[in-house]
Amino acid sequence: MSTSSPKSVHRRRLLQVGAAGIVLASGGVYAGTRLLSGSPTAAGDGTARAATSQTAPSGRVVTRELRAAPTTVDLGGRSVETWAYDDAVPGKEIRVTAGDELRVRLTNDLPVDTTIHWHGIALPQEMDGVPGLNQDPVAPGGTFDYSFVVPDPGTYWFHPHVGVQLDTGLQAPLIVEDPAEPGDYDEEVVLVLDDWTDGWSDSPDTILERMAREGMDMGGMSMGGMEGMEGMDHGGMSMDDAMPSPQAPLGADSGDVIYPGHVVNGRLATNPFVINSAPGRRIRLRLINSGGDTAYRFAVGDHRITVTHTDGFPVEPVEVDTLIIGMGERYDVVITTGDGVFPIVAAPEGKDAAPGRALLRTGTGATPDPTALPTEMSGQMLTYSALSPAAEVAFETRQPDRELDVVLEMIDGGRKWFINGAGFGDHDPLQISAGERVRLNLRNESMMFHPMHIHGHTFALAGQNGTGIRKDTVNVLPMETVSVDLQADNPGDWAVHCHNIYHAELGMQTVLSYAP
């Protein structure tokens, strides 16, 4: 979006911070329970403040400058005005090696506040990018220096943590290489899957305002929904019909927003991103779902995929035809290429919409129909229960020292989404202590799935649903409880929220807080 027509900011929220109230503008900035004294913050006057000094085990320092600004991008034949990092969607990949120190200076040339959250990285809390909780928001014209050692190899990404900015073009991969990686593949490609509305249809702010005003249309379920909501994707259904099934693994209602486009690496299916390779090559695909409201069913035509990592951490390899990747999740998969031209498809799960698509070209052949779905999409689907953690990343077996419930609820017909009976700003933090093994019981009492994300930690799937795989984002299905264990080894205050950005902004957030 050009600077002459900046995005309008319509909402202001009064959120409680301790006993004192503060007003935060910029379309619903995340606010937390407290801002730690001594945290490095951005003054908002165009100056940067130094981050906490760290020593990189590798001895290497990687530096980068990022500029968040309005821009016009080409989605492969469709020009849109949006916000992006350095005028690119997705933003340019940052690649480091585990043990490196990463130093990034963010310059905010947006007309509103912003931050960067380094999704999935266990870092010092003052670098985590949640305004009001970990840092002050970076004001227009301001800068902020992020600096932290990147501890774990894997596929990660970064995005703002202010309002619904995630549903613009502000997103980019962060790839952390493993110095001990066996390298049993020939090529590597990062694929960022995204749903797109900004600069094309309703803006994210407009969609959020409508949700807060009108709620959800759940038809026959009588959830207080309103008729005729443009941009809301629901239909009449009974309670039984809404539950997960083999045909609808996430449940019948998997999202609220009708997006006019779905893109892979910033390109539409009609003019797709192309991987040029050769037959018989082993290609590692790093998959990132950066969408605001859409889970994707992923497959490669005429190929089986071998899943090797989830949310950055290795698993015992499992071969499947297809997988579902929720918002904020990542998977690494390996394929052995055939000879020809093959579709790489990311179909919006549970939404009647044209899929996102890339192409794998290893030889001659006709380009597949951009709307066609490969048969693999209805083949063997990955489940969490099919995955086991690689031995080197498995948590030591240990009974939890503390067990906490995290109850996910829809309130007022979808106008609000709560955790443990309260929206963010009115919530009670989840209190833990350093050194504990903590079990969180994520109990979904709504009829929509929620990709739940915990900052600053990874966790292991535990209990009756668990296989011990390490993740930071997990899909919790309607009326399902998923138990996760985390090791309380990173003291501070950490956001816990649904990675459907609209659910989060309507209240489905809380804080994991270490006792002083």
Image: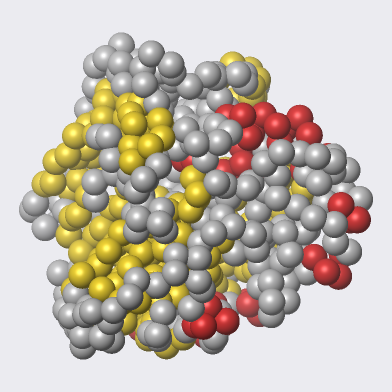
**Residue 103 in the image: x percent, y percent?**
19, 40
Whether residue 499 appears in this view of the structure is yes
The residue located at (26%, 26%) in the rendering is 107
Q: Give the left or right position of residue 441, taking residue 335 as reference.
A: right
**Placement of 195 over or under 304, stated as above or below:** above
Residue that protrudes farthest toward the front in the picture: 366
Residue that protrudes farthest toward the left in the picture: 59
**Residue 253 in the image: x percent, y percent?**
72, 59
Q: Give the left or right position of residue 264, taking residue 325 as reference.
A: left
Q: Nearer the viewer, residue 510 or 340?
A: 340
The residue located at (80%, 39%) in the rendering is 228
Q: Nearer the viewer, residue 275 or 13?
A: 275
Q: Nearer the viewer, residue 481 or 492?
A: 481
Answer with the quarter of the image where residue 246 lies.
bottom right
Q: Give the left or right position of residue 274, taking residue 227 as reference.
A: left
Whether residue 156 appears in this view of the structure is no
The residue located at (56%, 55%) in the rendering is 294
**Placement of 461 over or under 64, stated as above or below:** below
